Image (cartoon, helix red, strand yellow):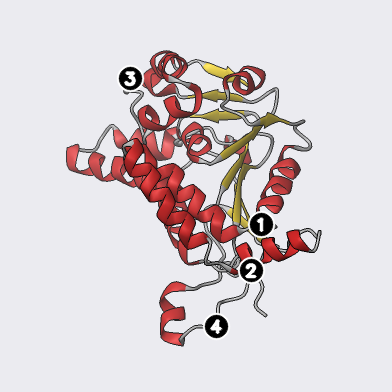
Amino acid sequence: MSTSTETPRVDPALAAGNFKQVADYVPTHFALQVEAGVATITLNRPERKNPLTFDSYAELRDFFGQLKYATDVKAVVVTGAGGNFCSGGDVHEIIGPLVRLKAPELLAFTRMTGDLVKAMRACPQPIIAAVDGVCAGAGAIVAMSSDMRIGTARSKTAFLFNRVGLAGCDMGACAILPRIIGQGRASELLYTGRSLGGEEGERWGFFNRLASPEEVLAVAQALAADLVAGPTFANGITKTMLHQEWAMTLEQAIEAEAQAQAICMLTEDFSRAYHAFVAKQKPKFEGN
């Protein structure tokens, strides 16, 4: 019987194009660990508070884009090294070059950064951000674009685009942030660029919970492991519907959920849950 991390036994031609393992991938611009179905991505430039560059944006975009084909990853944790999450776009490697570019090149850049968010929202795996310390600019967007966020009391999240003369409407912030914390609170953060502290972020609903700096990554990984132990195919459907229903009427959403749930009722996990209930046992889900 296949496990949740094995490549399904399908025609080799179909598997080659649609089922892949990413554990052996060695990234250039971030660190990656895949263990027991959980991929931990670490932004790893601690001496600069883990800023993003043109290259790291592109590699993260491509990696998240490939996760839809991954058979060995069922949940993702994103974190930063050295006590900070991410300080945003690197001032010297991104901001400096941008002021010298013309409109076509600038649009290519802003579309690339937006494509990272789209890839994070489109991959079926739930993403958990483990946020400590500085979480600013594009770093705040990466945390926002995750499905859940574990923070610390000392974390400082800032959508500081207006502090550098830009609009707060960056990488989907005006669409996603109000859905997490509400329109008024999102407006305050995007108009002022002020930092949102960890305890305030938990009260506002930006953080699902807080942990100590020493434990924040472990708490996020434990939550990811709980999700991996659940019905991962159904979790992917849940993420898809949470995202797609933003643009649906209530009637369309109810019909879409009816179709999605009917598909989930065809899975072995649904049958396993029933038989485990009858036997008064805990179901062991396998993601199929």
Q: Which residue is mark 3?
A: 165
Nearer the camera: disc 3 or disc 4: 4
- Residue at (47, 59) in percent of width and height: 262
| Mark 4 crowd level (few <14, some 14–19, many ≥20, 10 Å Cα) | few
Query: Which numbered disc flags the more N-terminal residue, 1 or 3?
Result: 3
Query: Which numbered disc flags the more N-terminal residue, 2 or 1?
Result: 2
Residue 207 in sight in this render? yes
| Mark 3 crowd level (few <14, some 14–19, many ≥20, 10 Å Cα) | few
- Look at the image and tell me in which quarter the C terminus lies: bottom right
User: Decide: marks 3, 4 in contact (CB < 8 A)?
Assistant: no
Q: Which residue is mark 2?
A: 4
Residue 258 placement (x, y as % from top left): 43, 51
What secondary structure is marked by label 1? helix
Query: Which numbered disc flags the more N-terminal residue, 4 or 2?
Result: 2
| Mark 2 crowd level (few <14, some 14–19, many ≥20, 10 Å Cα) | many
Q: Is residue 174 above or below residue 115?
A: above
User: Decide: marks 2, 1 in contact (CB < 8 A)?
Assistant: yes
State the residue lying farthest toward the bottom.
12
Residue 4 placement (x, y as % from top left): 64, 68
Query: Which numbered disc flags the more N-terminal residue, 2 or 3?
Result: 2
